Image (cartoon, rainbow, N blue to C red):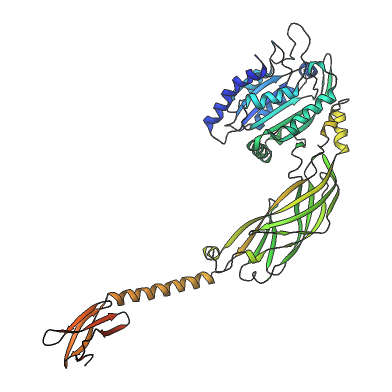
Amino acid sequence: MTGLLRLQRWSMLLLASCASVGAQAASHVFLVQNSGWMEPFYADPTSPYKALVTEVVQAAMAPGDALVLAAFNQSLPGAPSPRALLAQQGKPDRAKLRGVLDPLEVGRKPGGKAMADTDLGEAVGSAIDGALGGKPGLVWLFTNNRNSPNNDQATARRNREFYQLIHEGAAIRKALAFPLKMPVQGAQYSAGGLMVYVFAVQEQGARELDALLASGRLKQVITEMPARLKPLDQDTVRLVPARVENTPGVRYAVLPDGRLRAELDAGKSASATPDARITWRLENTMYPYTITAADISAQAALAGEVKPVALQTDSVRNLAPGRPQPLASSLSLPVANLPGKWSMAALSTAGSAQVIPGRIEVRLANQRLELSQAFRQRMAELFPGDPLPDIFTPPARIQHSRAVLPVEVRLQYGAGPLLAAIGGLFAVLAAAGALAVAATRGRKVLVTVDGEPRTIRTKAGARTPLYNTAGEQVAELHASLFGQRLANVREGASVRLGK
């Protein structure tokens, strides 16, 4: 049985567990390397390797999540890889994790004592296609970055193949790497560091990873800044408002989450388009890459209108992570498209504010990225002699990127228009009531037929025939809301209203 088929059997439990707890549950696959190159991580009595795996599982999983925990090296006949150690729904406690990790040893090739080789691509592919079954989730990989199937010494080429799997694999939407210092000494090998990868599968997996990072749980275990592998064309920079010059009729504020808010008085904003001078901090969010050069542009989308944002410069040079650069701009609000004070939106929010969401979009074109020297030095320290830093070279096709900053406009509406509208409504209702009373109330009308005065009872809309003393109809009395009149008067008859 191959490692893929073995993980597929475990995946049935994983997927069923996720279905039983609903759409909010996340799926995790934790791959723990136990090939020959990992010998010092298992042989050194002071090695924190298994303890790290335990704590990462504890930090990454929410109570309702599901997991497969598997050991991997390279699959051979009679020695499947990955090999599932634990699969369950719900976060396992530390005792249970130690119970399956403590007995784990370095894998051996069938029929001898030779230690197993490593195939990182096989392990990740099996996790995505087998354990997750093509469904969203997070795949975690604990490795020393020695990718050497069949003891292949061309580790640079093998690492490049692994890197291509990450960048060109459509299933992986986001990938991060945590380089950790972990000096260990074994009987045959020694090592200075360990790499923890996390791969978010599909868009839902990417959202789950973002939520995990935002929660801060993982940072309590891994304090190192993650190196981004993918994507390199989204959210590459961040705009943080540093100084905003208010304009007449507009008040600007920066919210705690970094959003820009503009507050306008709706009654005074329709006649002009106020411009604001905003100085931003332009930050590179693509650690460990430096944006050595890029063309930059920006536009604001609000109230159905897209307008360019005038930037002080149209290029970026040597923007390194953690070293923001100031960027001045002029922002014009499209107030002509905002709801007026007599609109339904204004009347429904009278006395309060209507919030209109928008965004500022930043685009980088002709982008050139370079791996920072500080990161190269750190990797050389943790993995001496390992050509791994070369595989962090960004793909040549990554030349464009975009980032979005949410903004909001708050329109302050007074209660005047609403009170006026309410007053008008009451006036209309009063008039309608008066008409209704007039239409249904009876009235007396004095008519004279052949010199004889008569009092006729009628109401609006009625048609009353009038007869002479001989009993012949000589006319009709038509009553309306606005009075009465004689109609169909016979020729020669003496009929009139009043005496």
Instruction: Answer left or right for 459 relative to 81.
Output: left
Tell me where residue 283 appears, x and y as whole percent.
79, 48
At 73% across and 48% down in the image, what residue appears? 403
The quadrant of the picture occupied by the N terminus is top right
For this orientation, the residue located farthest to the front is 491
For this orientation, the residue located farthest to the left is 470
The quadrant of the picture occupied by the C terminus is bottom left
Tell me where residue 134 appears, x and y as whole percent.
63, 29
For this orientation, the residue located farthest to the top is 111
Instruction: Tell me if I can see residue 7 in this picture.
Output: yes
Above or below, comparing residue 234 to residue 16 in the picture:
below
Instruction: Answer left or right for 466 relative to 25.
Output: left
**Which image quadrant is residue 412 in?**
bottom right
Tell me where residue 46 appears, x and y as whole percent.
78, 20
- The total of numbered circles placed on residues is 0
Tell me where residue 216 appears, x and y as whole percent.
68, 39
Instruction: Answer left or right for 147 relative to 130.
Output: right
Instruction: Answer left or right for 23 relative to 474.
Output: right
Taking depth in this image into account, of 217 and 234 the one nearest to the observer is 234
At 44% across and 71% down in the image, what residue appears? 425
Instruction: Tell me if I can see residue 48 in this picture.
Output: no
At 66% across and 16% down in the image, what residue appears? 2
**Which image quadrant is residue 140 in?**
top right
**Which image quadrant is residue 89 in?**
top right
